[in-house]
Image (cartoon, rainbow, N blue to C red):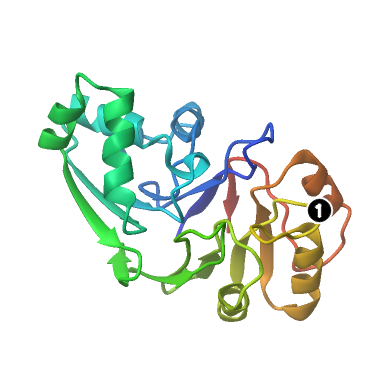
Amino acid sequence: MEVKLVGTGGIFSPLNSACAVINKHILIDIPNGSLKAMRKNGIVINSIDTIFLTHMHGDHYFDIPFLLLEKYKDDKNELKIIGPVDAEEKIKALTELAFPNTAKKIFKSIKIEYIKATEDVKVDHIAVSSLPMNHDNMEAYGYILKDKDMKIGFTGDTALCESVNRILNECSKVVIDSTFEVGTKTHLGVNDILMFLKKYPNTTIIPTHMGKKEKKLLSFQSFDNLLILDDMDDIN
C-alpha cells in the first residue's frame, strides 16, 4: 500500500488541508486546495476513482466539484464515494452551486456510486472498515485500511472516544487528528497525542490537521513512535 499525505494542516494553517492519497487513485477526504496540491506534485487527478469522506465539513470535501468537472471534461466517468448518508445530497448541492450551467451534464455523464460508510468495502486488495467518530454532533467516521503489507488507520476529525482507542490498538500506523494544543469536545489535541504515544508504544502515531503551533509543539517530542510528516511526504 502506497500512502502519501497530501496535506497535514487544519483550515487556519498554511499547510495543505488534511488529505491522503493511496495507491495514486484513492483519497481520504478531498478538501479545499487538495487537487492543486496533487497536480503540482505529479499526481494524475483523473486517476482518482475512490474517495472516503470522514465527514461533511467544507475543509474535507469542497474540492469534489472540481474533480467532477475534470472527469466530465476528460470522459473519466466512474467514481466511488464512501461517506455519511447525506454525502450525495451535499455533493450535488455544492456542485450545482459551483457550476450551475454544467452540473446536470456532469451528473448525467459520470457514474457515481455512493456507498454508506457503515458498509465494509474492498479496493485494490485493501479491506476498508469504518468506525463512528465523535465530531461536532454530526455523522463522522474514521477508517482502517488493511492489506498484506500494512494496517493503517485514519481518525478524521474527532474528539476523544472509544473508536480512537480502537484504531490505535488495531493499527500499526495511525494518521490522527491533532488540531489543538488541548483537546476539546470536537477535536483531539497535543495533550491527547502525548498520552497515546505512551499508551500505544508499538503504534506509529502520525499527527495531521495541525496548526503551526501544534506542529511545533509535537516536533519537540522525542518519542520513537511519533512521526511528524510534511505535506506530500510518504508513509512507508
Residue at x 53% of width, y 49% of height: 4
Q: Quadrant of the N terminus?
A: bottom left
Residue 235 falls in which quadrant of the image? bottom right
Q: Mark 1 points at which residue?
A: 181
User: Quick check: 159 above or below 43?
Assistant: below
Q: Which of 104 and 109 is in front in this view?
A: 104
Residue at x 83% of width, y 45% of height: 216
Residue at x 36% of width, y 57% of height: 83
Q: Quadrant of the C terminus?
A: bottom right
Residue 71 falls in which quadrant of the image? top left
**Residue 48 visible here:** no
Residue 146 in picture, x, y percent from top left: 43, 72
In the image: residue 142, left or right of residue 224: left
Q: How many labels does the image show?
A: 1
Residue 173 in picture, x, y percent from top left: 60, 68
User: Quick check: 74 above or below 89?
Assistant: above
Of all residues, the one furthest to the front in this rendering is 137
Q: Which of 95 and 82 is in front in this view?
A: 95
- The amino acid at mark 1 is Glu
User: Quick check: 205 above or below 112?
Assistant: below
Residue at x 60% of width, y 66% of height: 174
Residue 160 falls in which quadrant of the image? bottom right
User: Quick check: 151 above or below 191?
Assistant: below
In the image: residue 45, left or right of residue 108: right
Q: Nearer the viewer, residue 101 or 217?
A: 101
In the image: residue 227, left or right of residue 163: right
**Residue 115 visible here:** yes
Q: Is mark 1 on a helix, strand or loop?
A: loop
Residue 227 in picture, x, y percent from top left: 72, 58
Residue 128 in picture, x, y percent from top left: 38, 69
